Amino acid sequence: MDASGKQRFFLGTRSKPDTLRMAERLEDERRQIRLGYRPAPLSADKHSKRPFAEVIEEYLAWGESQGGKGGGGWASVHARMRRTHLKGWWQERLGLATLADLDGMLPRVEKALRELQAQGKAGKTLANHAESLHALCLWAEQRGYLAADPLKGLAPFDTAPQTRRRALSAEEITRFLSTCNPSLRPLYETAFLSGLRAGELRRLTLDHLDRERCGLRLDAEWTKNRQPGFQPLPKSLVERLYAFAEAGEPDRLYAQAYAQHRKPGLAPKGRLLYVPTHTHEAIAEDLKRAGISKWTPQGKVDFHALRVAFINLVIDSGATVKEAQTLARHSTADLTMNVYGRTRPERLAETVERVAEKLFSIPEHVPSMYKQAVGAETASATPFDTRELRLKNLVAVEGIEPPTRGL
């Protein structure tokens, strides 16, 4: 009889007395559990000896199937990073053989992260490493594979970026587009006027271009927020993109690039734009060609800075906060205004000048009723002497007895 009072069967030995003694011992243990003399066995106990590599594979399979937003799978980049962190780093770094090896692992995990920090790794990198292992532990706890989260006390890292991206001005954007590599100009124009990320631009095909509505249809499969959407574009750019893709330019450029790496069969086909594999190298060359510094006191310029420029152009255009948030495809207005929004020194100076202009344009003439010389008595603003106006003089004409003098 088990702890709940139900009859259970098990496979014993060939000896009936030995099997009976085993049954009596098991039944006695279950009776003690039912009476509260010993704790009930945890489901995690039977999983403690599972190979850690096997658990990782199950976790990764779950994530790629339904671990993303809205029950969708992880993005390919996210899945690759999780596999790299768990199998390529944590498992080897901590020597994890079974799931039970995670018990009491917090001090060793913190030490490993401190070593990464000493190597100069950014806070975001440390947070990504910690989050991958912590997410696995939480997932295993929810399924009863672990009795408790072994990393529950892990403190967060400061993930503030060490470098800040700056928003190019309209004059810099014009100069950049006029001198950049002609084959990349459609890509840059689309990035500046849509704010799409490099990975999203890379997935666009001619079918995503809507010439009637003048914009791009976005698929939930590859957008960062995992939401379908529509990004409006200027009509002139839509027509240029259509002509560029119809002429087969993206396919030609991809075939040429992949041939250099001896992988012609892997070249994408039917794309709307050509996006280089190493966008940071391409934009660095075009910035140099335009005479624009990549690094300034306001921050650096890389491909993602084109998205920053787009959002700030939207804000500068006079769009409402909600409109800017929608065009940026952000979940909160705080992300749009405080993370991507930038202030321009020249605009701040202009604002202060306008404030001063308004302040000093106030007329110097002040009504005499507000003026008073130092040491002078306060004079009444009434234009006649009220001491001559007594109520008894007013009512005497009517033949009414004058009131008390004090009135």
Image: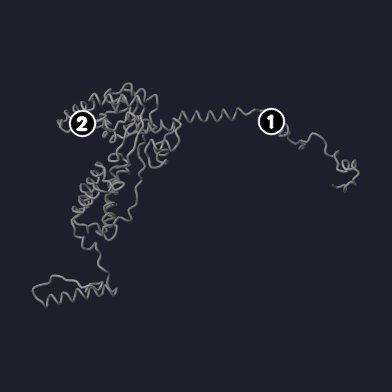
Give the amino acid at mark 2.
Lys
Q: Which residue is mark 1?
A: 366
Q: Which residue is mark 2?
A: 269
Q: Position of residue 387 (x, y in %)?
A: 84, 39
Q: Position of residue 233 (x, y in %)?
A: 35, 29
**What colour scheme governs how the chains and residues are painted in the rendered image of this protein?**
one colour
Q: Is residue 103 above or below residue 118?
A: below
**SS for dot 2:** loop
Q: Which corner quadrant of the image does residue 243 belong to?
A: top left
**CB contact under 8 Å: marks 1 and 2:** no
Q: Is residue 111 above or below residue 368?
A: below
The nearer-to-camera label among 1 and 2 is: 2
Residues packed near mark 1 inside 10 Å, few (<14), some (14 to 19) or many (20 plus)? few
In whole angstroms, how far apart are the C-alphas of marks 1 and 2?
A: 76 Å
Mark 1 or mark 2: whose residue is earlier in sequence: 2
Q: Nearer the viewer, residue 237 or 224?
A: 237
In the displayed structure, does residue 402 sit left or right of residue 153? right
